[in-house]
């Protein structure tokens, strides 16, 4: 976000979150995708697992604080830690 | 006996739950998810449906809705809670029951009647059934595959906390688990719909006994 003179008004940070199933948790959707790829002629696939990707923009200047916030979001809502892992990438703009 | 049914955005079995409760004279109140306080009640029902469109994960956002703070408080101080289908998903997401409900292993939405074995007839929800009795209840779900790690499953079995088991597992649930209770036996989560089996003309009466059990315990 920029003001009239072009200088930034607020710091914006982008967080990219990958949410994936834990090892050992059955992923029938991944299996179905693997089958479909096989049908299309893509051989040599050992396994396919499906996950979720979320992007968010935070109004935060400090990457450490941004990471802390996003971690809390993952623990509290975005990932079900019984069955899912999460990985967070913080990009400064 | 007073009861309440929580209504989340896109709950769709809330009215059937209310009809089942009315049928046993349990005067249900419908409570909106956005409220912060439950009325005085002897039973809380989390109904079936697709709350929040199942967005993110089934039951994930409903489990964090404003009313859930009071639901958790009441549950922890001993008010019985019945979670049916989406309600079971909400109970696991809220941490009131262990494990998680995942996508059916066959990937299809299953809508049919199934045979269940009542594996614990000592709970307040199942006392009107015989131990080991088989009953027929409808299921209607896409994410009914119960998952917990082996240690948790062994623990649940050991404590007798598996209440209903599928005779022919339709969705890949671990140990054929269709319904479980918490440590105190006052919180039941089940994927099949007892509220859809309270009329001999429509899916029979096997579900009515569950509501009758609750009534007889609480009055």
Image (cartoon, coloured by chain):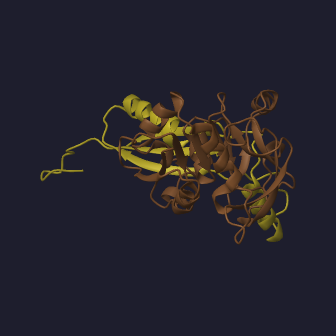
How far across and how far down the image is residue A18, in percent?
57, 45
Up-down: is B192 above or below B160? below
Q: In the image, residue A26 lies at what x, y percent?
A: 77, 47
Find residue B204 and report its horizontal and vertical position in percent. Answer: 74, 65
At x 71% / y 36%, what residue is drawn? B123
Q: Residue furthest left?
A: A4
Q: How many numbered tags mark residues here? A: 0
**Residue A43, how many percent across, how many down?**
85, 62
Q: Give above or below for A32 relative to B61.
A: below
Residue A33 visible: yes
Residue nearest the viewer, comparing A80 with A62 = A80
Q: Chain A is drawn in which colour?
A: yellow
Does B218 sit left or right of B32 as displayed? right
Relative placement, left or right, of B146 versus B169 is left
Quick one: which chain is brown? Answer: B
Name the residue rendered at 77%, 65% in the picture: A37
Residue located 87% across and 52% down the image? B167
Q: Which residue is at the front of the view, A10 or B54?
A: B54
Q: Which residue is drawn at 77% across and 64% down?
A: B113
Task: Please state, as top left, top right, bottom left or bottom right, where the C terminus of chain B lies in the image.
Answer: top right
Q: Does the image show residue B61?
A: no
In the image, residue B196 sits, relative to residue A73, either above or below, namely below
């Amino acid at each position: 976000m920029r003001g009239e003179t072009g200088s930034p008004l607020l710091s914006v940070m982008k967080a990219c979150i990958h949410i994936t199933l834990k090892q050992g948790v059955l992923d029938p959707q991944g299996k179905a995708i693997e089958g479909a790829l096989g049908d299309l002629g893509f051989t040599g696939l050992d396994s396919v697992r499906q996950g979720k990707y979320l992007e968010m923009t935070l109004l935060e200047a400090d990457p450490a604080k941004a990471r802390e916030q996003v971690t809390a979001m993952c623990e509290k809502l975005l990932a079900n830690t019984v069955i899912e892992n999460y990985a967070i990438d913080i990009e400064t703009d | 006996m007073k009861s309440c049914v929580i209504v989340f955005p896109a709950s769709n079995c809330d009215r059937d739950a209310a009809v089942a409760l009315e049928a046993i004279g349990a005067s249900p109140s419908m409570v909106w998810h956005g409220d912060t306080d439950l009325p005085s009640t002897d039973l809380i029902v989390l109904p079936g449906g697709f709350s929040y469109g199942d967005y993110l994960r089934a039951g994930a956002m409903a489990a964090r809705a404003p009313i859930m703070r009071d639901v958790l408080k009441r549950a922890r101080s001993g008010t019985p809670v019945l979670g049916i289908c989406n309600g079971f998903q909400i109970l696991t997401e809220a941490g009131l029951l262990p494990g998680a409900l995942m996508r059916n292993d066959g990937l299809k939405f299953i809508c049919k009647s199934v045979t269940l074995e009542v594996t614990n007839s000592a709970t307040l929800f199942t006392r009107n059934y015989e131990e080991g009795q088989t009953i027929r209840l409808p299921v209607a779900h896409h994410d009914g595959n119960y998952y917990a790690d082996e240690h948790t499953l062994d623990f649940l079995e050991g404590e007798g906390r598996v209440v209903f088991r599928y005779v022919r597992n339709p969705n890949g649930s671990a140990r054929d688990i269709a319904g479980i209770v918490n440590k105190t036996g006052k919180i039941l989560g089940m994927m099949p719909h007892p509220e859809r089996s309270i009329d001999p003309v429509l899916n029979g009466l096997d579900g009515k006994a569950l509501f009758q059990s609750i009534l007889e315990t609480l009055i």
